[in-house]
Image: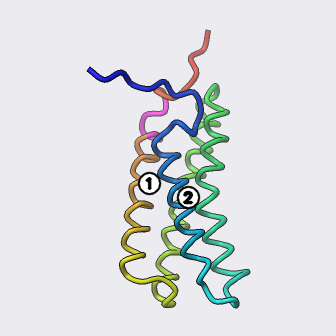
Amino acid sequence: MEKRKQIRSAKDLLVYQKAYQLAMMIYEVSKSFPPEERYALTSQIRRSSRSVCLNLREAWAKRRYEAHFISKLTDCDGENSETDSALDFALDCGYITPDQHAELVSLCNEVGKMLGSMLRNPASFLIPRR
């Protein structure tokens, strides 16, 4: 039987790793967005995708308090949904291909499902009170 790796930080969470991968993929693909989108869609999609990871780190730091933990996870979920919508804009504006869109949205949905699972079962992530 395989021993589960102990989670020492948010970086060890599969959801964090997937969200980070998504943010980096979006960074790469958004390099080719037109210059007029620099302060609009390019900036927005990079910010929202990165914010999932940043809020996960904050959530992890607040595991002692269930309400704070859930609040930050809810922020993660909202930012992930925002990223998903931005990907739709990128597709419809012709900045990404349907294949790129499908791959990125699939990863976005995977992250969303993991966040949803954490929101439904926060107790397993909390630091127990003494």
Foreground label between 1 and 2: 1
Span of residues in magenta: 118-122
Dominant secondary structure of the magenta stretch?
helix
Residue 60, x across and y down, in percent: 61, 35
Label 1 amino acid?
A: Gly
What's the residue at 42%, 46% (across, down)? 114
Instruction: Work out whether 109 lies above or below 124.
Output: below
Residue 49, x across and y down, in percent: 58, 62
- Of pointers 1 and 2, the one earlier in the residue sequence: 2
Label 2 amino acid?
A: Gly
Instruction: Work out whether 6 lies above or below 58.
Output: above
What's the residue at 61%, 29% (across, down)? 63
What's the residue at 46%, 88% (across, down)? 92
In the rendered view, how is the structure colored? Answer: rainbow
Q: Return the mark for residue 6.
A: none
Q: Nearer the viewer, residue 119 or 11?
A: 11
Question: In the rendered view, does 102 fall on the left or right side of 30?
Answer: left
Residue 45, x across and y down, in percent: 60, 71
Residue 101, x across and y down, in percent: 42, 75
Quadrant where the N terminus sits is top left
Residue 26: say if magenta.
no
Residues marked 1 and 2 touching at CB (< 8 Å): no
Instruction: Work out whether 99 lies above or below 57.
Output: below
Q: CA distance from mark 1 to mark 2?
A: 9 Å
Is label 2 in a helix, a strand or a loop? helix
Instruction: Work out whether 40 lies above or below 104.
Output: below
Query: Which residue is under mark 2?
Result: 78
Q: Quadrant of residue 97?
A: bottom left
Query: Which residue is under mark 1?
Result: 112
Q: Nearer the viewer, residue 16 or 114?
A: 16
- Mark 1 surroundings within 10 Å by alpha-carbon count, few (fewer than 14), some (14 through 19), many (20 or more): many
